[in-house]
Image (cartoon, rainbow, N blue to C red):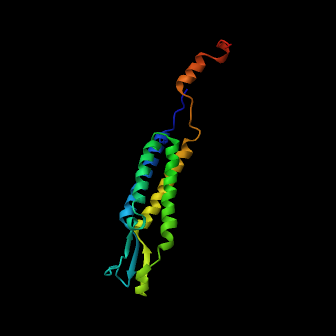
Amino acid sequence: MHARLPAGFVGPSALRAALAATALVGALLLVVATFSTIIQITVGTTSRLANLDTELSGADRHGPALVLLAAFAVAMTAGALRGARPAMAALVVCGIAGLLISLVGDLPHLNDTGQVGVLYSDARAAPRVGYYAETLGGILLVIAGGVMLLASTGTVREAPERRRDAESHPLEDRPAST
């Protein structure tokens, strides 16, 4: 006997698909962060200074790390969408790695003016869209993988063939092995 879900109830496959889409958005944000400005240094009202680098992108700060992390997250999303718990856990790990890059690698340097601050007393550094993209990307990956893992606990079921086989051949009716 199969219980029917109430009308409007999101089933497990729909939830998993929505979480996979969330993970893909998280991976996309990591790629966006690679090519976006993470930290921008301004002097007065300008950030354009001759011979000084005043805009640091994700690629400047981390090389290809965010793109590689995003590519791995996309591959793991495909596995997680099929129900592979190790892939779901890998999404959480990808998100944590993205957050570590953001919070440990970039956060302490968001207000660091570097050489520009040495040359110009009114130099200021601030985070830009790339910083927020890498942070949000990591958060979305942790949420997607974590909720998939939590939603998949306790859903392991006995294969239908085994259930039918056990029902048609109860243990009491089987010949004793010698």
Q: Percent from the top left, x then y, of residue 14? A: 45, 42
Residue furthest to the left in view is: 50
The quadrant holding residue 170 is top right
Q: Percent from the top left, x then y, of residue 5? A: 51, 36
Q: At x 65% / y 13%, what residue is drawn?
A: 173
- Which residue is nearer to you in this view: 98 or 143? 98
- Which residue is nearer to you in this view: 104 or 156? 104
Looking at the image, residue 149 sits to the left or right of residue 44; the answer is right
Tell me if residue 170 can be seen. yes
Q: Percent from the top left, x then y, of residue 83? A: 49, 40
In the rendered view, would you say 118 is above or below 36? below
Q: At x 54% / y 44%, what residue is drawn?
A: 151
- Which residue is nearer to you in this view: 42 or 50? 50
Tell me if residue 11 can be seen. no
In the rendered view, would you say 157 is above or below 86? above
Looking at the image, residue 174 sits to the left or right of residue 110; the answer is right
Q: Percent from the top left, x then y, of residue 29? A: 40, 59
Residue furthest to the bottom in view is: 121
Q: Quadrant for the C terminus, please.
A: top right
Image label count:
0
Q: At x 58% / y 41%, what residue is drawn?
A: 153
Q: Quadrant for the N terminus, please.
A: top right
Q: At x 44% / y 79%, what residue is drawn?
A: 114
